[in-house]
Image (spheres, rainbow, N blue to C red):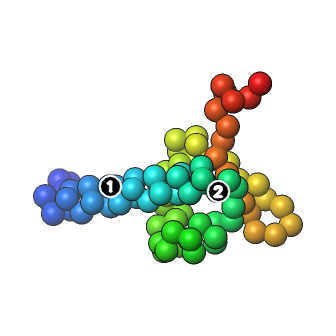
């Protein structure tokens, strides 16, 4: 089954939007350190779905990690190997 040009454009738009949101989330974590997913959503003013897709993008790129404690899970950037000394 071949995708229509309209479907392809729509997919391209979604991919671009998710990538841009992932960049915003990465920058927020870089500037602010570990935080809850809810705080990221609130501070950036984007939907829960957009935050979760952005986090999935960053997880796929091995850029973030989660910690599950007694409260809300927190997310943080992974440290680069060069930072671990």
Q: Quadrant of residue 42?
A: bottom right
Q: Across the whole image, how many numbered discs are drawn on residues?
A: 2
Q: Quadrant of the N terminus?
A: bottom left
Mark 1, secondary structure of its residue: helix
Q: Residues within 10 Å of mark 2 (few under 14, many from 20)?
A: few
As rendered, which of 18 and 26 lies closer to the eye? 26
Residue found at x 52% / y 41%: 61
Which label's residue is closer to the chain start, 1 or 2? 1
Mark 2, secondary structure of its residue: helix
Describe residue 39's horizontal placement relative to residue 58 as left or right: right
x then y, percent, for residue 81 = 67, 27
x then y, percent, for residue 11 = 28, 58
Residue found at x 47% / y 72%: 46
Q: Distance of mark 1 from mark 2, alpha carbons?
A: 24 Å
x then y, percent, for residue 44 = 51, 69
Q: Quadrant of residue 28?
A: bottom right
Describe residue 1's horizontal placement relative to residue 83 as left or right: left
As rendered, which of 81 and 9 lies closer to the eye? 81
Relative to 59, say whether 82 is above or below.
above
The disc at residue 16 is 1
Outermost residue toward the right in this view? 70
Q: Quadrant of the C terminus?
A: top right
Disc 2: which residue: 32
Quick check: can you spot residue 11? no
């Amino acid at each position: 089954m071949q995708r229509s040009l309209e479907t392809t454009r729509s997919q391209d738009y979604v991919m671009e939007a998710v990538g841009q949101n992932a960049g915003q989330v990465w920058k927020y974590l870089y500037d602010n350190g570990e935080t809850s997913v809810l705080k990221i959503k609130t501070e950036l003013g984007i939907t829960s779905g957009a935050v979760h897709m952005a986090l999935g993008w960053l997880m796929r790129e091995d850029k973030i990690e989660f910690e599950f404690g007694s409260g809300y899970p927190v997310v943080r950037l992974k440290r680069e190997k060069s930072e671990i000394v």
